[in-house]
Amino acid sequence: MELCDDNLTALIALVRQHTGIAMNEHKRVLLQGRLRPRLRALGIASWAGYIERLASDRNEVTSFIDSVTTNDTVFFRTPAVWSWFEHAFLPTFVAAGHGAPLRIWSAAAATGEEAYSLAMSCLEHQAHAPGLRFEILGTDISNAALATARAGEYRGRSVERFEADRPALFRKYLTPHGDGVKVAPDVAQHVSFDQHNLLGRPPRSVAFDLVMLRNVLIYFDGEHQQQVLAGARAAMRPDARLVLGEQESITRLQTEFTFEQAHVYRIGGEK
């Protein structure tokens, strides 16, 4: 059962409506592959029938969002980002003596590896700065991804790469669990997860010192990129930092952010 042009256009519009993600006709094969299991599970024989179901069933919209969103992440992705976080950002934050916990938002957290990586780095820094307190919030639009994040159980590529790159941290903060590993309680206690659409209001009223918004802007068009960045800005302290992904640049957009170094932006002003 192939997607005709009209149904493809309707599904692309629904993806944008519910997630803000911009797709085009070249995503036909991707959408077919990701959504066919939903049609089979629901016993729906046509794409038109599935589109009608989305219009009347809020629960199916949740499954639709889970199906069409990409949740690909690994522990300690992009070494340059973690070098900056561990050797520049954390020492600077501690030296400033804010007196409040370090608050970090891992936006588009997917299955949680980034949020837990942040917690591990902070715990390591506590050995040199015992007064460091920290809270990490991970959010994602996908409830299925968040279920994995909350469980803190991992296996496969992400785990293998982590063990190879940082064996000491791997052994210290992950414990064997079935055919994979589980995040240790002393890591998990610093991390919470909530469902959040990046096009909506900031997830909490507290202001964050660091927002990790990596590898997600590439899925939005210019209008929605600006909307997402405005939401991030509204959630940040005046001296906070924003971290983007390797392939992302916001210099062409009208925002309040100023480039500081590769991947890292600050609010306004000069470096």
Image: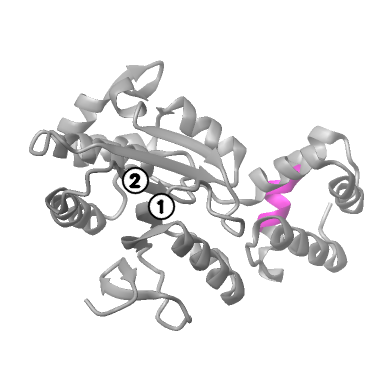
Chosen colour scheme: one colour
Residue toward you, 22 or 98 = 98
Q: Dot 1, crowdedness within 10 Å: few (<14), some or many (≥20)?
A: many
* In this picture, residue 182 sits left or right of residue 150: left
Of callouts 1 and 2, the N-terminal one: 2
Q: Mark 2 = which residue?
A: 103
Residue 78 location (% of width, % of height): 29, 55
In this picture, is 53 found above or below 40? below
Q: Quadrant of residue 89?
A: bottom left
Look at the numbered disc 1 and give the secondary structure of its residue.
loop
Are discs 1 and 2 less than 8 Å apart at CB?
A: yes
Residue toward you, 231 or 42 = 231
Q: Dot 2, crowdedness within 10 Å: few (<14), some or many (≥20)?
A: some
Magenta-colored stretch includes residue 255: no
Q: Please identify the dominant SS of the magenta region.
A: helix
Residue 100 location (% of width, % of height): 27, 43
Q: Quadrant of residue 269?
A: bottom left
Type of the residue with mark 1: Ala
Magenta-colored stretch includes residue 35: yes
Residue 48 location (% of width, % of height): 91, 54
In this picture, is 130 found above or below 20? above
Residue 50 location (% of width, % of height): 86, 47
User: Which stretch is magenta?
Assistant: 30-36
> Which residue appears farthest toward the top when viewing the image?
178
User: Which residue is rendered at x = 40% and y = 52% of the image?
Assistant: 207
Look at the numbered disc 2 and give the secondary structure of its residue.
strand
* In this picture, residue 148 sits left or right of residue 29: left
Type of the residue with mark 2: Arg
Q: Mark 1 = which residue?
A: 207
Residue toward you, 159 or 148 = 148
